[in-house]
Amino acid sequence: SQTIHQWPATLVQPVGSPLSLECTVEGTSNPNLYWYRQAAGRGLQLLFYSVGIGQISSEVPQNLSASRPQDRQFILSSKKLLLSDSGFYLCAWTTEGTGTYEQYFGPGTRLTVT
Amino acid sequence: DQQVKQNSPSLSVQEGRISILNCDYTNSMFDYFLWYKKYPAEGPTFLISISSIKDKNEDGRFTVFLNKSAKHLSLHIVPSQPGDSAVYFCAASLASGGSYIPTFGRGTSLIVHP
């Protein structure tokens, strides 16, 4: 069966520090991968998605970046965090060609920028 | 501009009664709709979906209704149980356009009282 892992589960970082969040998927190949952020009282905001290794699409211009160094690995990074980067970060995956379109989400990372 | 709107941020229901969560969308091109359930500090989990060629889809206690002319969908939970207490997200996508990327609403927090 497929599983998706995210770490760390929680993170407290000072303003201006770097960030690296990692997401890995098991049990599937060539998934589409997504990074979302849920800010307090808000919905799910799509940040980045990837349809393959090295292929990243950005939905929202900001100080975050994403990379996909391996088929089932998706990394969210920042060189300098802002207070507004605080939120709940979610990684998700889908596979094409199955005829279904639901996304499968990881457990999330709670980021607090102080 | 929100393309998917969940105008009720919260809903309180007695155990055993029906819960009705509503969702409106503005893009008439959306052709696939999904509901996700999210517990605190966890990732959303897929609940039920409906294609625009249908007006109803049922799965156990959960039924989704789609009214394309009104650009409105609703999720009915009957009977409601305390374990249903969670945030429910509505999502819509352009599946026929090859996009598996849904647009999410801001969520409705459902509280089911024993």
Image (cartoon, coloured by chain):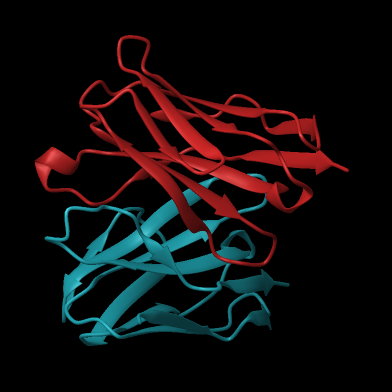
Q: Would you say B54 lies left or right of B18 here?
A: left
Can residue A63 be seen here? The reply is no
Residue A93 image position (x, y, % from top left): 32, 68
The C terminus of chain B - image quarter: top right
Please state which of residues B87 and B61 is positioned toward the viewer in this rendering.
B61
Q: Drawn colour of chain A?
A: cyan
Please state which of residues B105 and B44 is positioned toward the viewer in this rendering.
B44
Instruction: Place residue A46 in its image quadrant.
Output: bottom left
Instruction: Place residue A12 in its image quadrant.
Output: bottom right
Residue A53 image position (x, y, % from top left): 16, 81
The N terminus of chain B - image quarter: top left
Q: Drawn colour of chain B?
A: red
Q: Residue furthest bottom?
A: A70
Q: Residue at x 60, y 55 (%)?
A: B38
Q: Residue at x 49, y 67 (%)?
A: A90
Q: Residue furthest right?
A: B114
Q: Residue at x 33, y 75 (%)?
A: A66
Please state which of residues A51 and B1 is positioned toward the viewer in this rendering.
A51
Q: Considering only vertical position in the picture, is B68 above or below A31?
A: above
Q: Residue at x 66, y 81 (%)?
A: A11
Q: Considering only vertical position in the picture, is A97 above or below A56?
A: above
Q: Residue furthest top?
A: B69
Q: Would you say A94 lies left or right of B59 here?
A: left
Number of marks in picture: 0
Can residue A64 be seen here? The reply is yes
Residue B6 image position (x, y, % from top left): 55, 29
